[in-house]
Amino acid sequence: MQTASEIIDSRKEDGSHYEGMRTRLLDATLAVVGDVGLEKLTIRKVSDYAGVSVGLAHHHFENKSNLVYKTFVHLIRRMRDQLTSGRRGIADPVERMKFTADMCFNQEVMSPGAANVWPHMWSSSAHDAEVQRLCAAFSRRLRSNFLFDLKQAGCDPAMARIHAVQAMALVHGLWIEHKVAGSISMDEVIGIFHGMIDNATHWVWKSNMRRSASAH
């Protein structure tokens, strides 16, 4: 007969296995979408790629639409967690803002699978209230990060808000120019974004340094 602690440990293992299988299927979805596109995505192809039964895949996801939505949530949560952990270790607000910018164009976000899922879900937000709330929450979180860094760098609140909106416009615009239009390289994407951050903050640093020097 199992003890209470053994039962709890068993439940934890079951939950961990469940989440592990879900993540495995979500990662498989991104790989399949990257290979064949969203139109040809099926739960059977995902289950075959993941090496599990179709029934098991359906146990986790009701249908293709639910699978794509959960994959989008998976992408957002993973990026959110990476941003939170990475930003925590960066004291300089300008460098922290550049790290945030870089994360918006990391290898996972720019992968073929994400490049199909991400814009599809954003366009779906026009007629799906649940997706719209998710997209809006993600944008608010990202804009809040930029706004916080800009204020810490010395920008006054009004200008910080303007620069934060500019940063968000760059996230979306540069992604399209690179991934969809193919008009600029990734080096150019990062260079443009970092340049905007430098232009928005360097005058503040220089002004603060001059005031500090004159005070002495």
Image (tube, rainbow, N blue to C red):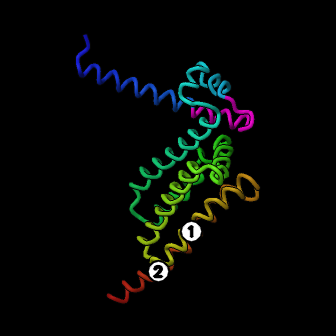
Figure check: 85 above or below 160: above
Circle 1 residue: 165
Magenta highlight: main SS: helix
In the current view of this chain or complex, which residue is farthest to the top?
1
Between 192 and 31, the one nearer to me in the picture = 31
94 part of magenta stretch = no
- Viewer can see residue 128: yes
Quarter the C terminus occupies: bottom left
Residue 99 shows up from this direction: no
- Please tell me which residue is depicted at 55% across the width and 21% down the height of the picture: 56
In terms of secondary structure, where does tag 1 sit? helix
Where residue 125 appears, as percent x and y from the top left, is: 62, 52
Location of the N terminus (image quadrant)? top left
Chain-order first, disc 1 or disc 2: 1
What residue sits right under mark 2 in the picture?
206
The stretch in magenta equals: 26-42
Residue 36 sits inside the magenta stretch: yes
Q: From the top left corner, tell me how far across and down residue 83 is, in percent.
A: 47, 52
Q: Give the side of residue 131 with respect to residue 80, left or right.
A: right
In the shown orientation, is residue 60 left or right of residue 34? Answer: left
Disc 1/disc 2 C-alpha distance (Å): 23 Å
What residue appears at the point 53 percent right and 68 percent down from the top-left corner? 164
Which image quadrant for residue 26? top right
Amino acid found under the numbered disc labelled 1: Val
Q: How many marks?
A: 2
